[in-house]
Image: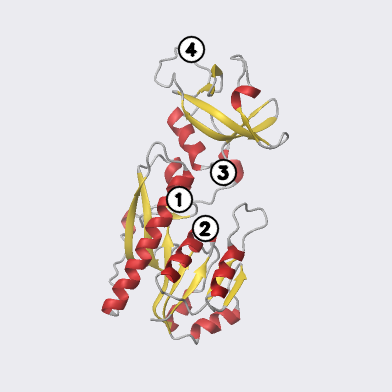
Amino acid sequence: MKFGFIGGTPRGFSLLKELLRNNHKPEFCIVLKEDDHEILKVSDEMLEVSQSHNIPNEKKKKLVASDYARIENGDLDFIIVCGWRTLIDPKVNQFIRIGMIAAHDSLLPKYRGFAPLNWAMINGEKETGVTLFVINDGEVDSGDVISSMKVNIEDSDDINSVYSKVIDATIRCYLKMIQDYQKNGKLKMHSQKESEATYTCKRTPEDGRIDWNRSSAEVYNLIRALVHPYSGAFFYYDSVKYTVGSASPGPKNNKVFAGRIPGRVVAIYPEGIEVLCGSGTIMIHNFYIESLKGVHAANTIFKSITLKFN
């Protein structure tokens, strides 16, 4: 069995280490070069691990002609693509027995496209998952499916805890795929049901602005879907931006307010401040203030129930 590895991010790094631990050594590793602004950087560690196993490796943001030549002449069974962000020409599949096998963070054909985990949490989904599929020349994330695994989203989860579950599911899916291929010399696949496909658009940091007219459930889902290391859900008060670090449904979340002003602080507690939403309330525990640097307890900054956020 001969395969290549193209990927990055903490998930790709975790997968690479587990592959090597199970004696599945790729012929080469092409490692994703992170953007300068990214907080979590694992590319140098990935290079060190691959070098320690005498695996040819490079770090870059996109494939170039020499990479495609390596693939064309590699006599590969498949290529694992995990945590890679730029397009790969699917024509290269003709030189690979199975093809390029990618991991997508959803139960395809649902949530094709950008930031599927974040969108699933923002939309209040109770489950998401991982799907292994063959990269094709059709619509984004539309290739034949090899396997999938569900991941539950609990009310107490944030994006980091869900991501940890997804990493575990990704590793299990790839190891099972390799086991099946070694046993049978082929992989069973099935096409996706196009009638069930849904899509996501790209998110920008500005999309994290909190709309206090939304329900408390919607606000909470936005906050927990965008916590650090993502750009965060935020609001403004007196022209200062506050990025929420931690929140939960408020103690008065189920009380009926006949007089309601979304964005108004209604209570201050040792644990944080409670803010009215379009329905329900949110308890903000702490937030990041760019001008002051660092994380601050909400009740040390805001101490009045006359305040209204926007």
Side of 135 relative to 9 (left or right): left
Q: CA distance from mark 3 to mark 2?
A: 14 Å
Q: Answer yes or no: is residue 144 visible.
A: no
Query: Residue beneath label 2, please?
Result: 10
Query: Residue beneath label 3, please?
Result: 228
Q: Which mark is residue 152?
A: none
Q: Earlier in the sequence, mark 3 or mark 1?
A: 1
Q: Which mark is residue 163?
A: 1
Which residue occupies the foreground of this view, 308 or 297? 297
Query: Residue beneath label 4, please?
Result: 259
Q: Tell me if label 4 and label 1 are in contact, CB under 8 Å.
A: no
* Local secondary structure at mark 1: helix
Snapshot quadrant of residue 232 = top right
Q: CA distance from mark 2 to mark 1?
A: 10 Å
Q: CA distance from mark 3 to mark 1?
A: 12 Å
**Residue type marked 1:** Tyr
Q: Tell me if label 3 and label 1 are in contact, CB under 8 Å.
A: no
Q: CA distance from mark 4 to mark 3?
A: 34 Å
